[in-house]
Amino acid sequence: MTTVAIIGAGPLGRWLALGAARAGFRVLLEDVMPGALHHARESIRQQLNPEALPAVAFVSTIEDAVREADLVIDCVPDELESKLEILWLVDRMAPPRTVIATPTTNLSIADLASCTNRPEKCIAIAAAPQDLADATGREIQLGAAPFTSNATVALLTDFWQQLGFRPSVERFSAL
């Protein structure tokens, strides 16, 4: 089973955690704000079947979230400083195999990935966070840098297909 760490328990993080758990993934949902994590726990408990609930763990540190993750999706604001901080932390705390995916419509995945020690394992989810929750069953665009590996693209494509999306991939040039 693939382990998915989701950084940020706001609306997008909760929606992704719920969808991933329903699709059979093991989910670690992280937020440093206790109130956000509590709200996420209660919301997910109300919406998830009892047999799927053990698939979701709620953690308060990035290290606890990414330690065993195969895939990390950050749900932080689409701002350069926020993305760089999260990617830096994940890159240093996650196992080398871990893929990092980031929703962004404003930032270059090539630039963000080049700030990590695993640029081949970084990929963008080219959608505004508020658009994702309403998009189930529709196409979702993934953005790959020239150096993003085929295995990274395959893992993200499979993840979104299991959530009911039709992923397509665009390779962006590194400028």
Image (cartoon, rainbow, N blue to C red):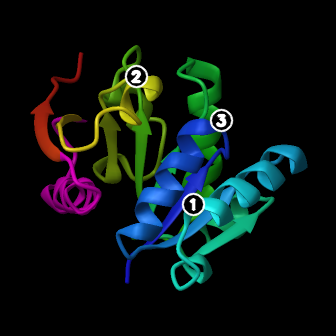
Residue under label 2, please give it.
128
Query: With respect to residue 100, does 125 lie above or below?
Result: above
Residue in the image at 40% along x and 18% along y: 107
Which amino acid lies under the numbered mark 1 shown in the image of this protein? Gln
Answer whether labels 2 and 1 touch (C-beta < 8 Å).
no
Residue under label 3, please give it.
85
Using the image, tell me which numbered label, if any, was put on residue 47: 1
- Sequence-wise, the earlier of marks 3 and 2 is 3
Residue in the image at 29% along x and 28% along y: 126
Query: Where's residue 131, x and y in %?
Result: 38, 25
Start-end of magenta stretch:
143-165
Which amino acid lies under the numbered mark 3 shown in the image of this protein? Glu
Query: With respect to residue 122, does 172 lie above or below?
Result: above
Residue 2 position by quadrant? bottom left
In this picture, residue 87 sits left or right of residue 1: right
Name the foreground residue: 59 vs 102: 59
Query: Where's residue 10, x and y in %?
Result: 66, 39
In this picture, residue 11 sits left or right of residue 98: right
Residue in the image at 40% along x and 14% along y: 106
